[in-house]
Image (spheres, rainbow, N blue to C red):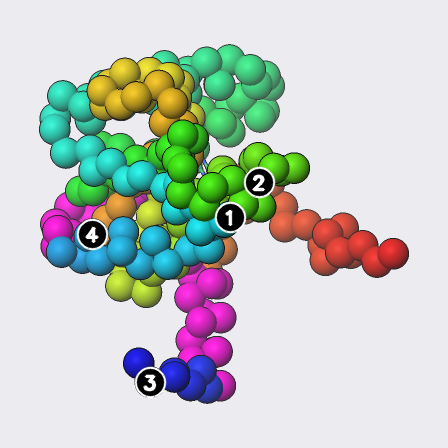
């Protein structure tokens, strides 16, 4: 395989990709080519993983029954989350769209196989949580790859994970990492929706970089 050259033009494009990635909750109803979905999953598996454990497992949620069960799970958890807020924050929370479960053409659940023997434990004796980090990196890799194809990804975590395993008939040991809604976005923005809706502000660089 010939060694690629990442030139300045590529770097500028890559920066644009990072800036325009977005968490997407509103999708057009155009289908996503199933081969493209499989390609995204293949690209996600290029992510780093502790000890090359490759602990990620991808579940395409296609049946109406499974999707309805996930939607019901979200609705309940979202109502409970709303109850945890009061005053203006509660009013704002109630207005936010926090999942595109109804309109996203592709539902992809990413799990961690905690029992994986791949990697023989290398790198995670002292930090077992690195197995989870590995699966999360696969999600982020898929997120960026999807965006490069004009697709949007929305991460839904307002779910009871144990119920997700039951709905999808998966082993208890598989830990839900991300439930992803994937499709072509209705809108494209260079800033997060929660920032635009006044839920949170961007932290100044001085708050996130510490020197010792
Ligand atoms: C681990 C994780 C879980 C998230 N869960 C949700 C969710 O349940 N609902 C939602 O609307 N957004 C969810 N998001 C998206 C974040 O709200 C979003 O990334 C953040 O507001 C920044 O916006 P951006 O991704 O468009 O830059 C999640 C993101 C991450 C990384």
| Residue 31: percent from left, percent from top | 12, 50
Q: Are marks 2 and 1 in contact (CB under 8 Å)?
A: yes
Instruction: Find disc 1 in the rendering and name its residue.
Output: 50
**Picture residue at 76% right of the left edge, 50% below the top:** 207
Q: Give the class, few, some or many, for how many residues have Cα within 10 Å of label 2's Cα (few <14, many ≥20).
A: some
| Residue 189: percent from left, percent from top | 41, 57
- The answer, for residue 23, to whether it is visible in the render is no
> What mark, if any, has residue 2 been given in the picture?
3
Ligand 1 has an atom within 8 Å of the beta carbon of the residue at disc 2: no
Q: Residue 36: name its quadrant.
A: bottom left
In terms of sequence position, does the residue under pointer 1 or pointer 4 come before the other? 4
Q: Is residue 139 left or right of residue 86?
A: left
Instruction: Find disc 2 in the rendering and name its residue.
Output: 124
In the rendered image, residue 56 lying in the magenta stretch gets the answer no
Residue placed farthest to the right in the image? 212
In the rendered image, which quarter contains the C terminus? Answer: bottom right
Q: Is residue 39 above or below residue 24?
A: below
Instruction: Find disc 4 in the rendering and name its residue.
Output: 37
| Residue 145: percent from left, percent from top | 34, 60
Q: Is residue 61 above or below residue 149?
A: above
In the rendered image, which quarter contains the N terminus? Answer: bottom left
Disc 3 to disc 4, how far (Cα)? Answer: 26 Å
Disc 1 to disc 3, how far (Cα)? Answer: 27 Å
- Magenta stretch? 8-34
**Picture residue at 43% right of the left edge, 30% below the top:** 114
Disc 2 to disc 4, how far (Cα)? Answer: 31 Å
Q: Give the class, few, some or many, for how many residues have Cα within 10 Å of label 1's Cα (few <14, many ≥20).
A: many
**Picture residue at 12% right of the left edge, 28% below the top:** 63
| Number of the front mark, 2 or 3 | 2
């Amino acid at each position: 395989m010939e060694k690629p050259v990442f030139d300045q033009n590529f770097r500028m494009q890559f920066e644009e990709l990072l800036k325009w990635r977005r968490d997407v909750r509103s999708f057009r109803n155009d289908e996503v080519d199933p081969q493209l979905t499989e390609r995204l999953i293949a690209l996600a598996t290029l992510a780093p993983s502790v000890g090359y454990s490759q602990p990620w497992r991808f579940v395409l949620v296609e049946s109406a029954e499974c999707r309805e069960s996930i939607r019901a799970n979200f609705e309940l958890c979202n109502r409970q989350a709303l109850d945890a807020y009061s005053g203006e924050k509660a009013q704002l929370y109630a207005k936010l769209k926090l999942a595109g479960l109804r309109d996203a053409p592709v539902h992809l659940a990413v799990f961690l196989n905690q029992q994986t023997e791949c990697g023989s434990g290398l790198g995670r004796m002292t930090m077992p949580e690195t197995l989870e980090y590995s699966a999360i990196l696969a999600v982020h890799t898929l997120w960026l790859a999807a965006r490069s194809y004009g697709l949007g990804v929305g991460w839904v975590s307002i779910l009871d994970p144990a119920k997700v395993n039951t709905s999808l008939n998966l082993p208890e040991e598989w830990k839900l990492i991300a439930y992803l809604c994937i499709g072509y976005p209705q809108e494209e923005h260079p800033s997060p929706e929660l920032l635009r809706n006044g839920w949170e502000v961007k932290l100044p660089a001085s708050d996130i970089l510490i020197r010792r």
